[in-house]
Image (cartoon, rainbow, N blue to C red):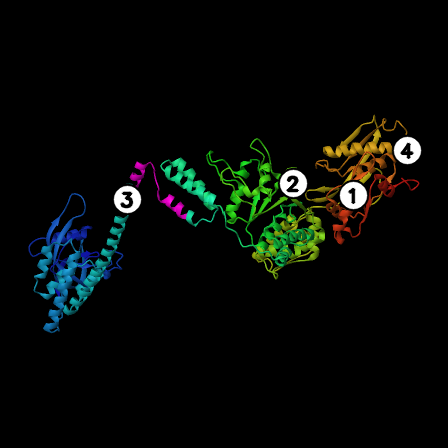
Amino acid sequence: MNNQKIPMIILSECVVFPGSSVYLNLYDSRSENAVSQAIGPGGKLVGVTRMPAETADDDHSKLYSVGTLLEVKQMNTPRKGHPQAVVRGVCRVMIEEVHRESDCYYCEYSEFQEIESEEDSQTILAMGSILNALQRKYAEFREDVPATVWDAIADEKDRGAYVDQLSGLLESDYTQKQKLLEEPSIDEREKRLAVYMTQEINLFIEQEKIQKKIRENIDKKQMEMYLREQIDAIHEELGDDDVGSQAAKYLHKLEKLKAPKRVKKAIREEIMRYQRFAKNPSESEMIRDYLDNLFAFPWKKKSEESLDLAYAAQVLDEDHYGLTKVKERILECLAVKAMKKDAVSPILCLVGPPGTGKTSIARSVARALGRSYVRICLGGVNDEAEIRGHRRTYVASMPGRIVKAFCQAKTNNPLVLLDEIDKIGKDYKGDPSAALLEVLDPEQNKHFSDHYMEIPINLSHAMFWCTANSLELIPLPLRDRMEIIQLSGYTDNEKFHIAKEFLWKKQKNANGLTNSQITITDKAIRMIIARYTREAGVRDLERKLILLCQKAAKIIATGEKDKVRISERNLKEYLGKEVHTIRMANKRAQVGIVRGLAWTAVGGETLEVEVGIMPGNGKLLLTGKLGDVMKESAQIALTYVRSQTAKLVKDSYYAEHDIHIHVPEGAVPKDGPSAGVTMATALYSAVTGWKVRADIAMTGEISLRGSVLAIGGLKEKMLAAKAAGIAQVFIPKDNESDLVEFSEDILEGITVTPVSSVKEIWKQSIETASGEA
């Protein structure tokens, strides 16, 4: 052991072998001081490498135990940057102890004991030949090392020095180099060196392959670019600006496109036009958009249609409760299609209040037929271009909604639902309803003209259905092309079955609830229908069921309860106070008060008409926010009553009295041609002073001769009468045939009396002193 302290420098990710010269960057003052002390004749220092796990400069236990005794050949101290030292390895040493004094590391070291070679001369020669061959191969990849260095190493006769000099040139990880430094056996040192050199040579070969591929790709792309520039120049000389890759793609797509010959011809001409104008960005972009739309349209692509009536009936029954007449009519249309596949599909228009299943039944039919389903909402559309598309001369032009729907469906035989067709608008931009005439006419839609596409389109393979809330708002020419199917409101019993069998199951699954977590009683469902919703459909009813499921989900998720049971007793805890109260029939007969029946967009409603007479000068006052039609009904009713009461009151009666007709809930607009008989009966009662029965209701328009005229919305009105507890309902004689289509639960408990004149109503409803009207 050398007891003399010698300066030491800690090397980071660097190993110095005996006989190798290395440039060292001195990043700290301790290393600089160690090198400074070793400069001069006989000066030495020890270099030892830090282990990979080293994290702190003062942790000497992380240093390797074998280092290299170094001599300093040169030291440079530049003005800027860190000092550099050129050192040369002398021999291996064992680090025995490390000291730190002042600003420098010192160590005590001992001689490194090497093991003599145990191999025979033949093995030594063979190993030397292997290393020489590896050196020559390695030198081919290390162009950064001068040839003189390789020659000097090859001339080295000492085995140990030869191995050390080769080891110093390796680019291997420093931990591998440290293993070579620590190896005491020269035989093992040669074997390790051969392995490391082989690994590096293989890595160089793989890198060279990758670089060769990269160069080849770059050369290929450069060649393609060069050829394209030549082609562009040739076409520019010929007056044909560009036939770029995009045009080639379009031509390739055109070969695979299934479309009529006239369409392919038009597309080909447009591609040629694109090639001519490709240098003009604005023009080429418009042509590209146009070509993309032409390729997106399903010219001859059809979905396989299923005409199994049994399956269609099963799907309709699975998705919808009731609607018997509607389902029958739909199945009849499908039956014709099954008998004659090329039969023209009728344009069905489903008319009814919101939430009665118009849109969903169309979706079910599409599923039953195996056709694509696409919905076009027409509410608020007031521009003809929305239907026919914009002409291509306009900036940002695009196809109409009909063409877009077919592109969305990706087939030319979808079921297209024109939703809310009664809410279509009209202004200075054109009449969209007029544009729809061509779409819905089987004789015209074979050659539908879209302003953007500019190619006649065959729409006859598609099924067009429409929905509307009010038939009166659909333009007459458009209505003439449709077959109207009325969807009236649901009865309470139908709503109950829909809620129990469809909506409740749907919302439980949608809100992540199981049957064991939430239950609801039948009485609770009926109470929701009667007290919390007032509608013809079931949309609001479904919202109430969603609210119940969400509240139950919160209770279960917070751990308040494991199970929620909803009944009529605790329903208010979840939905709050009752929203709707039904105006029940009056308890006693009164003068001048008559219960009428009205149709609204959300179902039927009972409507009381009150008449008051007071001294005046013959004025007729109308209140209750009545529309023009109801005001006319009031005038007609008054004229008829005056003609019928001439013998009951004196001649000056009407000149000396003012008559006030009021319909309660004045903030709600009211209009419609069905209040005539109600107003006439209330006027007759008020003028004569005779009372009107409290348990009756009536509906119908009146003529000047007292005839009762037919009305619409009878089913909704009957449902309202039943909910109010009415015992007898007077309806126009002409509506008697409508009763055949009503289910038994609608008419149960109500006496329906068809009448042809208002006098028949008076005879059965007004209580006179003599018992006759």
Q: Is residue 215 left or right of residue 646?
A: left
- Residue that protrudes farthest toward the front in the picture: 261
What residue appears at the point 75 percent right and 47 percent down from the top-left corner? 738
Query: Magenta stretch: dominant SS?
Result: helix
Circle number at residue 479: 2
Tag 4 and tag 3, C-beta contact below 8 Å: no
- Magenta extent: 231-253
Q: Is residue 246 magenta?
A: yes
Classify 489 as above or below 62: above
Callout in the foreground (2, 4) = 2
Q: Between residues 752 and 79, which one lies in front from this camera angle?
A: 752
- In screen coordinates, is 122 left or right of 715? left
Does residue 219 belong to the magenta stretch? no
Q: Which residue is mark 4?
A: 648
Precedes in sequence: disc 3 or disc 1: 3
Quadrant including the C terminus: top right
Q: Is residue 283 left or right of residue 736?
A: left
Q: Is residue 346 visible?
A: yes
Please report whichever mark, 2 or 1, sits nearer to the chain's N-terminal start.
2
Secondary-structure class at tag 2: helix
Q: Look at mark 1 in the image and give the residue it sits on.
A: 734
Residue contact between numbered discs 2 and 3, judged by CB atoms under 8 Å: no
Classify mark 4: helix, strand or loop: loop
Local crowd size for mark 1, using a 10 Å CA cut-off: few (<14), some (14–19), many (≥20)? some
Residue 116 can be seen in this image: no
| Amino acid at dot 2 | Arg
How far apart in space, not on screen, are marks 2 and 4 (Cα)?
49 Å
